Amino acid sequence: MAYTNQKDLSLLNLGFLLLLLLIGSLVSESNGKVIIPTQYASLHLNRTSFPPGFIFGTASSSYQYEGAANEDGRGPSIWDNFTHKYPEKITDGSNGDVAIDEYHRYKEDVGIMKEMNLDAYRFSISWSRLLPNGKVSGGVNKKGIKYYNDLIDELIAKGLKPFVTLFHWDTPQALEEDEHFKEYAELCFKEFGDRVKHWITLNEPWSYAVGGYATGYAAPGRCSVWQKLNCTGGDSGTEPYLVIHHQLISHAIAVKLYRDKYQRLPKFTKEEAKVVKGSFDFVGLNYYTTSYAAYAHLPNNSFPSYNTDSRTNVTTERNGVSIGPKAASPWLRVYPLGIYNILQYTKEKYNNPLIYITENGKDGVKVKGYFAWSLLDNYEWISGYTVRFGINFVDYKDHQKRYPKLSAHWFKNFLVKKKKY
């Protein structure tokens, strides 16, 4: 079987105390060696260890999963342009043209979710698949609408709840210098809102702004010339802030649009309608690892950028000791306690909001669900196909065939007791 030498990656060592230890995890190193957390081996948890209605799901994104980049009217995104124009910036020189072909295999993948006893699926919509030119005035791609309708209907037919992310980094290339997020969001609410009741506006806005506009390692690859990082132009001292500003405004506008037009709620006061403040119903929290942070002393002649503004030195070691075992990705260290800490921080800092773990307890934190990243191995951005985060193995050399890893069997057994919905 194709998965026998890919024992597994990240799902049995990244958990959170109960849920963390639950997801406890098998983590594979790049050489295939498996890290087995034996201290968790005697832990006996199952679905009944969590409150009624707790949701377990997996997560994905359109560019990393769908493929079919040039099919059925889809327009190019900034990641299409970035990976084709600068293949040297991708570890293996690859792109997401095919990815794992979920566009053609979504029924198979939904079947895998059903077989694993999952409750929900978080996926993102490709903006450029619905609006190839980024704008409604440029034409709506009906084949794109049909694909997501078919995916949503298939999920519901199999008893899975769709959680939909509007934006997961793949801005239409046509909008590199334009903004039409509101009309894109309205199109999604109009076409899919009768069945989708859980929406995520933006996925990891910080990562998108810093990676794309401060350091240039991600699409569209912009940063200041002085960084000498082979960027495509840009200003690391201003553009990341402009991008975050517009993302926050876009988020707030989309939320206000949904609440005013697509959700039966009382009329908002002027105070409630202020941009950003109060513009979320729940927090989607992604957790992978934890780092040490210390104050960074900078020379007076340092160039302005997000990194210099933060005055922070981030490292995975202290006194020569790593914060946790290495995983396959060079930036990833296994540190289960970190997710507990960030949940507690969010609870205390932001007045205990509802939380869904959208990628990857107790103590009064209102955790309502957990979405593991990810159902399948997939295209991992600048790492290409060299890193595997899937619960299920994808054989890229044999037509993207899917095989269960140990983590898939573990999840299936853990979730075997059905919820009473």
Image: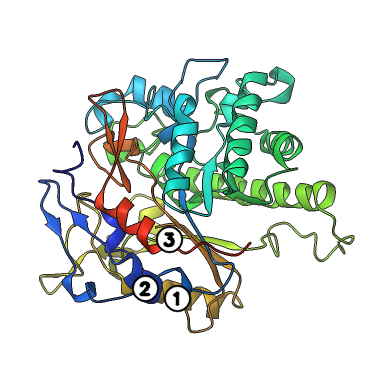
Q: In the rendered image, is residue 305 in sight?
A: yes
Seen from the viewer's position, the closer of residues 128 and 100 is 100
C-alpha separation, residue under disc 3 versus residue under disc 1? 12 Å
Query: Residue tagged by mark 2?
Result: 45
User: What residue is at 76 percent from the left and 37 percent from the top?
Assistant: 190
The colour scheme applied to this rendered structure is: rainbow
- Residue 136 is marked as none
Seen from the viewer's position, the closer of residues 336 and 391 is 391
Nearer the observer: mark 3 or 1; the answer is 3
C-alpha separation, residue under disc 3 versus residue under disc 2? 11 Å
| Quarter of the figure that contains the N terminus | top left
User: What residue is at 49 percent from the left and 43 percent from the top?
Assistant: 239
Q: Position of residue 148 (x, y in %)?
A: 61, 32
C-alpha separation, residue under disc 1 versus residue under disc 2? 6 Å
> Does 319 appear above or below 305?
below
- Mark 3: which amino acid? Val
Query: Residue tagged by mark 3?
Result: 416
> Does 43 appear above or below 331?
below
- Mark 1: which amino acid? Ser
Q: Position of residue 368 (x, y in %)?
A: 56, 67
Left or right, residue 195 beside residue 35 = right
Residue 395, quarter of the rendered image:
top left
Q: Secondary structure at mark 3?
A: loop
Q: Are marks 3 and 1 in contact (CB under 8 Å)?
A: no
Q: In the rendered image, is residue 217 in sight?
A: no
| Neighbour tally class for label 2: few under 14, some 14-19, many 20 plus, Cα within 10 Å | some
